[in-house]
Amino acid sequence: MPVSTMQRTTEHHAHCIYEQEVARVIGPGTAAGVFIGEMDGSMVPVVEPSPEAEDKRKDKVLSWKEVRLNLVHPQGSVTPVFGGNFADGVEESGRQWGRCAAKAGFGPSSHLHGVGDGAPWIVNQVDLQFGTQGSYLVDFFHVCEYLGEAAQGCAADHPQAWLDVQKERLKTNQTAAVLDALAPFVRADENDNPVTACDRYLRHRLDHLDYQGAIQQGLPIGSGEIERAHRSIIQERLKLPGAWWLPDHVKTMLALRLNRANREWEAYWQRAEKEAAGTGQPTVASL
């Protein structure tokens, strides 16, 4: 089979999956209990015609744009439901997170434990989409990166020992003690100073550092799950060496990848075969 035929077939079914998902109505779930939710962005290579180009086929603009991926699953489950979007803004990212939660069974009696890198837009979407049914925790290892950078400025002779003490303090909600350890070395007039940056990062996120509570409840304090998902769902396909994507193809290929990750692949083909049988048109059983 020619490569061009495989490409057209893949693009056709990716587009169909995308359109079906856009039209799909997701009602709230009925499950109770705690759900884990994570969301993060990943950059993909995009090619677009130059606005000033006379020949749209030749003059191109290459750039990197963000694809946002999210996941939700009940506490204790190892089978997440995934959602995502490309170039549609943070509000759409939040909406897709809410849809993802509903698919996973999240309902009026559920609570979402969100974990992420502390980006304000993600925190805002937790509030907008889940309200009092949601809480947010800054990824522990992301905070430790800031502390690791600050360690050299606070304890140049024993940075690792100093860092280990701060980690244990964070895990027991002694954030004030961590800030006290940073305070003598903060340089208010040096925004790029690692200690100043760490102090500022923590102070802006004091409501999202309850590591002790999460540990006691058996909840994750890191967002490694969404980072692994980015590699397997998005980067493995959309960051191939030398590949640049049209924006519309990023959207449709993302829909295809999410379909497979959510174990809806066979259901799609069953629908496609029924539709083909009804119209008398042939279909492709696999890609």
Image: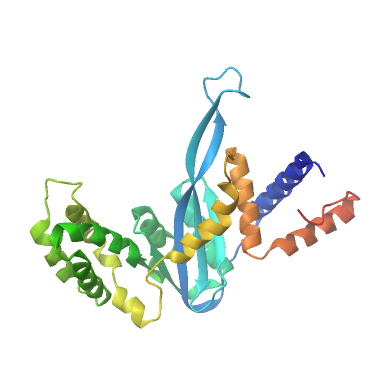
Q: Name which quarter of the figure residue 224 lies in.
A: bottom left
Q: Name which quarter of the figure residue 82 lies in.
A: bottom right
Q: Name the residue furthest left.
A: 184
Q: Name the residue furthest bottom.
A: 216
Q: Position of residue 207 (x, y in %)?
A: 27, 66
Q: Is residue 142 left or right of residue 15?
A: left
Image point (58%, 67%), residue name? 103
Viewer-side residue, 42 vs 98:
42
Viewer-side residue, 285 vs 24:
285
Q: Name the residue furthest front.
A: 157
Q: Position of residue 142 (x, y in %)?
A: 33, 61
Image point (29%, 72%), residue name? 210
Q: Position of residue 51 (x, y in %)?
A: 52, 24
Image point (60%, 63%), residue name? 26
Q: Looking at the figure, which quarter contains the N terminus?
A: top right
Q: Name which quarter of the figure residue 261 lies in.
A: bottom right
Image point (24%, 77%), residue name? 172
Q: Is residue 265 left or right of residue 281?
A: left
Vertical placement of residue 13 versus 137, above or below? above
Viewer-side residue, 80 vs 61:
61
Vertical placement of residue 275 versus 245, above or below? below
Q: Is residue 14 left or right of residue 151?
A: right
Q: Indicate how the structure is coloured in the image.
A: rainbow
Vertical placement of residue 168 versus 241, above or below? below
Viewer-side residue, 71 vs 1:
1
Q: Name the residue furthest right.
A: 280
Q: Is residue 119 left or right of residue 154?
A: right
Q: Position of residue 281 (x, y in %)?
A: 88, 48
